[in-house]
Amino acid sequence: MTLRALLLVATALFSIGIYGLLTRRQAVALLLSIEVMANAANLVFVVFARYGGAPGHPLVLFALAITVAEVAVGLALVLVLYRRHGDTLLELASEAKG
Amino acid sequence: MTAELGFGVFAFLLVGFPALRVVTSRDLVRTVLWLAVTLLGTAVLFALLHAPFLAGVQVLTYVGGVVTLMVFGVMVTHKHDGTTVAIDGANRVRGALAALAFFGVVAFAIVRTDLSSLTPVETPSTQDLAMALLDRYLIAFEVASVLLLAAIISAVVLARRRDPLPEGAEPADGARLQEGSVP
C-alpha cells in the first residue's frame, strides 16, 4: 500500500521545511521554506482525497489561494526591509519586536 | 512491501531531494529554482493521485506565479556580487534536531496506525469540483476572493510606503528611489 509511503514523504517534506525555517537567515529563503511546508500539507489533503474519499480537493484550492496571498504580502515586507537596511537578513528586523 | 518501499524512494527523490536543496543551497537564485523542482514533483504526485486539475493548477499558480514572483523578489533585493550567507552552525544542529524530532513523532504515529480501512476511491472530477466550489463552498470561495483583494492592496501599500529612516541610520542604496518610481 502506497498510502503509508506517501504520508511518510509528506512528513519528510514538512520536516525539511521546519529545518529551513529554523536555519535560514535570509527573509526570502524563509518564505521558500514556508512554501515547502504548505506544499506538504496540500499533498496530505490530496492523498486522503484518493484514499478514503475525504473532500480534500476544494481545500487544496483554498490553501493555494491563501499561500499565494501570503507570498505577495511576505515579499512586500521583504522589500520594505531591504529599503530600510539595504539587505534582507532577518536579524535586521529585530526592531519589529514589541 | 517492496513496491511500497520503491514508491516511497521514488516519491522522496521526486520531492524530498529538491526540498533538501531548497533549505541547504547557499545561493538564493538556486534555492528558488530548486523550489520550482519541488513544486513540479508535487504536481506529478497530484497527477498520480488522480487529481489532474489540481496538478495543472499547481503548475500554473505555483511554478508559473509564485516562483516568478520569488525570482523577482530575489532580483530586486540582492546584489549578486557572488557573496553567500553562512548558516550559523549551532542553529543548524538545533534546527536539524527539531526537524528530526517532528519527523520521528509523526512517522511513529503513521507507522503504528492501522490504515488498512482506507482504500483507493474514485476522486471527484473537475466538474464535481466546480460544482462543489460554487455550491457547497460558495461562502468560502467568496471569502477567498476578498482575502486575495486584501493581500493585493496590502502588498501595494507596503511596497510603495516611504518609512522615515530610524535615528542615525544611513539610507541604503535602494532607498534613494522617489515616491512612485519603479525599484
Image (cartoon, coloured by chain):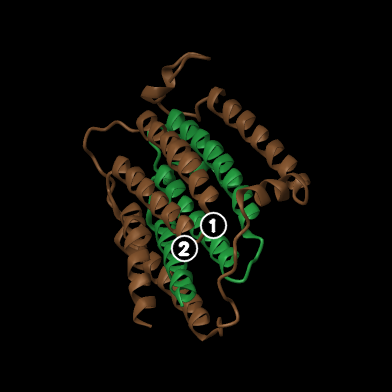
Chain colours: A green, B brown
Mark 2 vs mark 1, CA separation in Å: 11 Å
Residue for badge 1 = A42
Circle 1: residue type: Asn
Q: Nearer the viewer, mark 2 or mark 1?
A: 1
**Horizontal side, residue B54 vs residue B85: left or right:** right
Circle 2: residue type: Phe
Quadrant of the rendering where the C terminus of chain B is positioned:
top left
Tally of marks:
2
Where residue B103 sits in the image (x, y, percent)?
45, 73
Q: Are marks 2 and 1 in contact (CB under 8 Å)?
A: no
Where residue B9 sits in the image (x, y, percent)?
33, 70
Q: Secondary structure at mark 2?
A: helix
Is A79 located above or below residue A43 in the figure? Answer: above
**Horizontal side, residue B11 vs residue A3: left or right:** left
The residue under the point 56% across, 43% down is A70
The residue under the point 56% across, 85% down is B114
Q: Are marks 2 and 1 on the same chain?
A: yes
Quadrant of the rendering where the N terminus of chain B is positioned:
bottom left
The residue under the point 45% across, 43% down is B59
Front-most of residues B11 and A12: B11
Front-most of residues B132 and B85: B132
Decide which of tag 2 and tag 1 comes sooner along the chain.
2
Where residue B29 sits in the image (x, y, percent)?
31, 40
Is A3 located above or below residue B25 in the figure? Answer: below
Protein chain holding label 1: A
Where residue B50 sits in the image (x, y, percent)?
52, 59
Q: Secondary structure at mark 1?
A: helix
Is B94 located above or below residue B26 in the figure? Answer: below
Q: Residues within 10 Å of mark 2 (few under 14, many from 20)?
A: many
Image mark for residue A14: 2
Protein chain holding label 2: A
